[in-house]
Image (cartoon, rainbow, N blue to C red):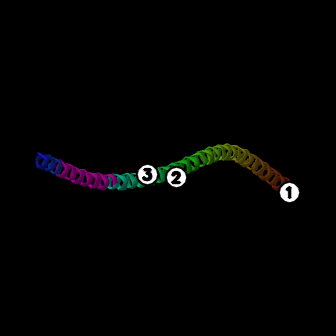
């Protein structure tokens, strides 16, 4: 009877050693998977940080472009105003030029008439 009980205990101990061995093997597999997951999580985190960095750079470039666009729009409006002012000045100068041309023609005609009158008067004398 003692022999049988000893044999049952030994069998039970062997079973427990086998279970411990299986559990240790499972523990190693889990540790390996855990390390793989940590590595993967670290890689994903680095990718996310790189994406954030790129997003920030693009946002900065976009802001810079918008600022340049606003500056260009303001400069365009200013230039359009200056062009309109120059066109208005040009029109006024053209009108003044026409007036002066007419005055010159009138004065030239008057001078020619006076010269003709002087010639006629000198011939009469």
Q: Is residue 121 left or right of residue 27?
A: right
Q: CA distance from mark 2 to mark 3?
A: 15 Å
In percent of width and height, residue 22 lies at 21, 52
Callout 2: SS: helix
| Residue assigned mark 3 | 51
The residue at 74%/48% (across/down) is 100
Q: Residues within 10 Å of mark 1 (few under 14, many from 20)?
A: few
Residue 4 forms part of the magenta stretch: no
Q: CA distance from mark 1 to mark 2?
A: 87 Å
Question: Can you say which quadrant of the picture contains the N terminus?
Answer: top left
On screen, residue 70 above or below 42? above
Of the numbered discs 2 and 3, the one sitting upstream in the chain is 3
Identify residue for label 1.
122
Q: Which residue is mark 2?
A: 61
Asked if residue 19 lies in the magenta stretch, the reply is yes
Is 12 placed above or below 28 here? Answer: above
The reply to whether the C-beta atoms of the residues labelled 1 and 3 are less than 8 Å apart is no
């Amino acid at each position: 009877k003692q022999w049988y009980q000893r044999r049952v205990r030994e069998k039970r101990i062997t079973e427990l050693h086998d279970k411990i061995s299986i559990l240790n093997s499972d523990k190693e597999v889990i540790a390996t998977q855990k390390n793989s997951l940590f590595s993967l999580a670290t890689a994903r985190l680095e990718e996310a940080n790189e994406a954030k960095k790129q997003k920030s750079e693009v946002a900065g470039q976009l802001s810079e472009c918008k600022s340049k666009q606003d500056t260009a729009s303001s400069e365009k409006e200013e230039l359009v105003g200056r062009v309109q002012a120059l066109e208005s000045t040009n029109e006024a100068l053209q009108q003044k030029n026409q007036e002066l041309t007419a005055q010159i023609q009138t004065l030239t005609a008057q001078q020619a008439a006076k010269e003709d009158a002087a010639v006629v008067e000198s011939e009469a004398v």
